[in-house]
């Protein structure tokens, strides 16, 4: 499978995963580090970057 820069940017840029319920959320890293964006599903504010496969 050929990997393009546009597709990797679309799939992995600014995408984070909730550490509690594993829900994907898109947001700016600065806002997530400050705790301004809660999870849509559980309301927690702990996220990790999505892993590239």
Image: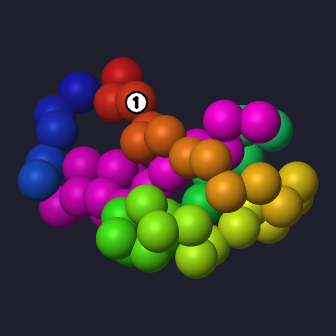
Q: In this view of the protein, which residue sits in the foreground, 5 or 30? A: 30
Is the residue 48 above or below the residue 36 in the image?
Answer: above
Q: Quadrant of the N terminus?
A: top left
Stretch of the chain drawn in magenta: 6-20
Residue 49 image point, x, y percent: 42, 42
Q: What's the residue at 36%, 23% (across, down)?
A: 53
Residue 7: x and y in percent read 26, 55
Q: Can residue 41 be seen in this view?
A: yes
Asked if 35 appears above or below 45 in the picture, the reply is: below
Q: In this view, does 4 lie to the left or right of 28?
A: left
Residue 13 in magenta stretch: yes
Apparent side of residue 33 relative to residue 1 in the rendered image (left or right): right
> Extreme front residue here?
34
Percent position (x, y) of residue 40?
80, 66
Where residue 4 appears, as percent x and y from the top left, is 13, 48
Which residue is at 83% across, 61% downward?
A: 43
Judge whether residue 23 is colored magenta.
Answer: no
Under circle 1, the secondary element is: loop
**As rendered, which of 10 and 41 lies closer to the eye?**
41
Using residue 23 as the reference point, say whether residue 11 is left or right of it: left
Q: Which colour scheme is used?
A: rainbow
Q: Mark 1 points at which residue?
A: 51
The residue most toward the top is: 53
Residue nearer the viewer, 5 or 45: 45
Going by the image, does 7 lie left or right of 37? left
Residue 44 falls in which quadrant of the image?
bottom right
* Residue located 56% across and 67% down the image: 35
């Amino acid at each position: 499978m050929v990997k393009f820069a546009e597709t990797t940017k679309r799939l992995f840029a600014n995408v984070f995963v909730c550490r509690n319920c594993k829900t994907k959320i898109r947001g700016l890293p600065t806002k997530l580090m400050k705790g301004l964006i809660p999870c849509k599903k559980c309301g927690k504010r702990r996220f990790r970057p999505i892993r590239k496969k």
